[in-house]
């Protein structure tokens, strides 16, 4: 009996090749398992990119992490009390200028800030723009609803813009801090600020080993895919693989935690994480603190002068 007769039909059947432009044939869409694995790989790539950005010789990269944490917190509190849209727009423009001075790609920074939370916040506050919730001068009439005229008010638009601008500015400040500061130095800065050591330790371990577990899941899926001849995976088999992978990953995480703790104890760990980095305030840190202080004072002063 020939080898062709023993082979399954799907293996010997010829398929029309796809041209590079995709105009011939039909491309098979990736299943949800593959999309999830690809998403995990993208998370790893973004994390490595963030580490590269934090090591560049930019404006914020030269500032001591503890100084950045304190000044960013002060800027966040100042942003929270501003009640005028023009001031928030000016603060957001300042964050864009700082991002460029720190060597961050402007489109990457804007996309990272606006991709999720500000847009989601905008969707949430859309009903507040209607005169049914925020009375005022109607600028965009939308017809009638149960005999009542419905429209978008100027006061509602101002309130919605104020909320979205405040959220966008706050997120921009946080993203600037995380992208321009290596994670280990950020945790060390939190420890110097008397943040509970258990919180800092758990946060550092979680950040470090979540990428290891993501890589483990990616390797498991790659191994499964390379050993599966039949490419016609259905939804039920994908769910079974996800369940099995979740159980195996949980077991690996538990075993890894025991091994890591034993290794830490063997190397002298006594419950307090120590860092080899020693923070020292230099001239540029003082200049940065003064610049932030002037910005906060000007922001609060203009906000008070404009009134409510």
Image: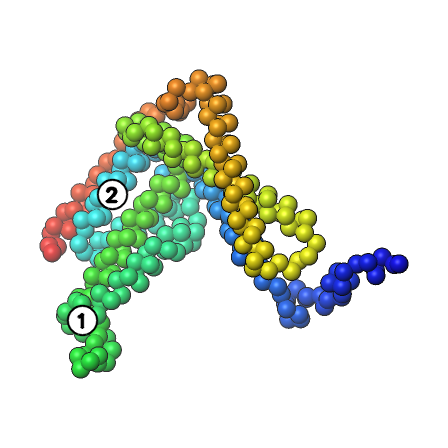
Q: Which of these two is toward me, 153 or 68?
A: 153
Q: Measuring 39% from the left and 19% from the top, which residue is drawn there?
A: 270
Q: Measuring 38% from the left and 24% from the top, which residue is drawn there?
A: 273
Q: In the rendering, which numbered label is found on residue 18?
A: none
Count of number-bearing discs:
2
**What residue would you read off at disc 1?**
132
Label located before the other in sequence (2 or 1): 2
- Whether 250 is drawn above or below 117: the answer is above
* Residue 242 spot, x, y in % from top left: 53, 50
Where residue 102 sits, quadrant-wise, is: top left
Circle 2 sits in a helix, a strand or a loop, which is it?
Answer: helix
- Whether 23 is drawn above or below 299: the answer is below
Q: In the rendering, which numbered label is found on residue 75?
A: 2
- Other-residue count near label 2 (Cα within 10 Å), few / some / many at <14 / 14–19 / ≥20: many
Residue 57 at least partly seen = no
* Residue 60 spot, x, y in % from top left: 36, 38
The quarter in which the N terminus is drawn is bottom right
- Other-residue count near label 1 (Cα within 10 Å), few / some / many at <14 / 14–19 / ≥20: some
The quarter in which the C terminus is drawn is bottom left
Q: Measuring 39% from the left and 39% from the top, which residue is drawn there?
A: 180
Q: Which of these two is toward me, 144 or 164?
A: 144
């Amino acid at each position: 009996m020939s080898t062709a007769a023993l082979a399954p039909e799907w293996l010997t059947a010829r398929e029309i090749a796809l041209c590079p432009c995709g105009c011939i044939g039909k491309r098979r869409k990736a299943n949800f398992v593959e999309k999830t694995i690809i998403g995990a790989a993208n998370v790893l790539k973004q994390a490595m990119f963030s580490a590269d950005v934090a090591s560049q010789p930019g404006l914020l990269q030269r500032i001591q992490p503890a100084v950045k944490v304190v000044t960013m917190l002060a800027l966040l509190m100042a942003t929270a009390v501003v009640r005028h849209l023009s001031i928030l727009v000016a603060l957001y423009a300042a964050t864009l200028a700082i991002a460029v001075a720190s060597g961050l790609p402007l489109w990457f920074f804007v996309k990272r800030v606006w991709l999720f939370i500000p847009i989601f916040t905008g969707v949430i506050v859309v009903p507040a723009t209607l005169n049914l919730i925020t009375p005022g001068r109607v600028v965009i009439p939308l017809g009638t609803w149960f005999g009542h005229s419905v429209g978008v008010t100027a006061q509602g638009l101002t309130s919605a813009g104020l909320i979205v601008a405040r959220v966008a500015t706050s997120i921009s400040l946080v993203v600037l801090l995380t992208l321009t500061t290596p994670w280990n130095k950020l945790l060390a800065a939190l420890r110097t600020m008397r943040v509970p050591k258990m919180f800092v330790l758990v946060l550092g371990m979680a950040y470090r080993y979540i990428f290891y577990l993501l890589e483990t899941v990616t390797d498991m899926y790659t191994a499964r895919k390379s050993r599966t001849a039949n490419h016609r995976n259905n939804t039920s088999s994908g769910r079974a693989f996800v369940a099995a992978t979740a159980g195996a990953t949980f077991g690996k995480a538990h075993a890894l935690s025991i091994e890591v703790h034993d290794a830490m104890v063997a190397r002298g760990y006594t419950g307090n994480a120590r860092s080899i980095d020693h923070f020292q305030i230099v001239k540029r840190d003082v200049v940065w603190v003064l610049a932030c202080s002037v910005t906060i004072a000007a922001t609060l002063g203009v906000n008070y002068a404009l009134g409510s």
